[in-house]
Amino acid sequence: ADSGRPNLGRFCALSPARDWEAMVGSYLIRRFFLMLLTLFGISVLVFTMLRVVPGNIADILFDAAGMIDTAEKAKLEKELGLDQPIAVQYVQWIGGLARGDLGYSYVSEKPAIDEILPRIPITAKLAGLALMFAIVFGVPLGVISAVKQNSGLDYVLRVISLSGLSMPSFWLGLLILMAFVKFFGTIPIYNNAPGGFWNALWLYSVPAAAVGFRSSALVMRLTRSSMLEVLRQDYIRTARAKGASEQSVNYHHALRNAVLPVVTVIGIEAAFLMGGLIVTETVFNIPGVARFLVEAIRWRDYPIVQNLVMFIAVVAVSINFLVDLLYAVLDPRIKYSG
C-alpha cells in the first residue's frame, strides 16, 4: 500500500553527482579568482619595478645623443605620459589592457600588439618542440632506468641525465653550431626566407633539442625516482602475485600512479619555456618573445615589457590551472573539496 510518502530514491541517486558538480564549480570559481588576484599582483609588481629602476627611455635617448636640453627631455616625457604619477599611469595601462589597447612601442612607435603577436608563434613552436623532446625521451628513459635499477643501462642513463642537468643550454647550442659548421658547412639559425614545413621543422628542431636536453634530463630523473617509489608499494607486489605481466605492472599500474609529479614538472617547464629561452633565441638568432623582452628592457620600452610579462604570466597561471585539472583525470582518487 502507498504510505503517502514521496519517492525520493531518484533524487538521492542524483545527489552525489550534483554534489560533485557543485564542488567542481566552486573549485573553478575559486581558482579563477585566484588567477585574477595573481595576475593583478604581477601587473602591480612589474609596473612598479620598471618605474623604480633608475632611468627611462628619455634618459637613455638623451644620454646616447649627448643632449642636455632639459626642456626637450621634459617635453618628450610629457608626450610619453611619463610625467604623470605612477598610479595614474597604471590605471591608464590597465584600462587600455581591458579594452584590448596595448599602447604603442616607445622605440618603433608601432602598436605594441603588432610588435608582440608575430613573435608569439615563433617562441610557441620552439617551446612546443622542446617540450615534446623532453616528454618523448624523458618519460620512457626514466621508466627504463627505474625498471633496470642498478644495471649497466641504469648507470649510463643516470650519467646522461646528470650531464643534461649540468650542461648549460647556451653552451650546448654553441657546440651544436660549431659541429654543424665543421661537418656540414652551414649554421642552423633562423631566417625569414620562405621555406617548406620540413625546412622550418629542421631549423626549430636543432635549438629545441639543445633546450629540451636539459628538460628531458629533469623529467627522466623525476620519472625514475617516482617509479622506484611506486614499484615498492604493496599493490605492485599484489599485481605480480596475481600473474600480471611485467609490462602491465610497469606501465598500467606503476606509471599511471607515478606520473603525477612528472606532470607537475612538465607544466612548470612549459611555462618556463615560453619566457626563459633568452640565451637560446640569441644564440640561434630566433626573433622570439624572450629575446624581444630583453631588448625592450634595455631600452625601457615600458608598453612592450609590461605586456610581454603579462602574457608570460597568463600562460604560466593557465598551464598551472590545466595541470591541476589534469590531476583529477589521471588519478580519480583526487577530489576537489568545496
Image (spheres, rainbow, N blue to C red):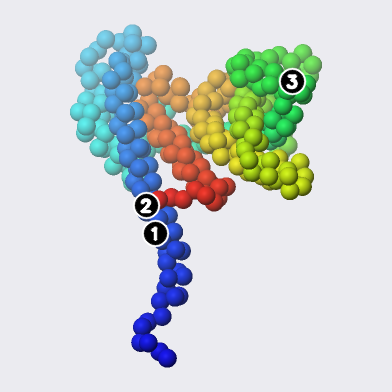
Up/down of 243 relative to 206, above or below: below
Which dot marks residue 156? 3
Residue 192, position as x, y percentages in the image: 62, 31
For the point 49% across and 40% down, the residue is: 319
The residue tagged 2 is 338
Q: SS at mark 3?
A: helix
Relative image position of residue 291 (x, y in whole percent): 51, 24
Q: Looking at the image, can residue 186 be seen?
A: no
Residue 332 as seen in the image, left or right of residue 38: right
Mark 2: amino acid: Gly
Vertical arrangement, residue 57 with respect to residue 205, above or below: above
Given residues 191 and 128, the one toward you in this image is 128
Q: Earlier in the sequence, mark 3 or mark 2?
A: 3
In which quadrant of the rendered view does residue 152 lie?
Answer: top right
Q: Is residue 64 above or below residue 190?
A: above
Is residue 213 at least partly visible in the picture? yes
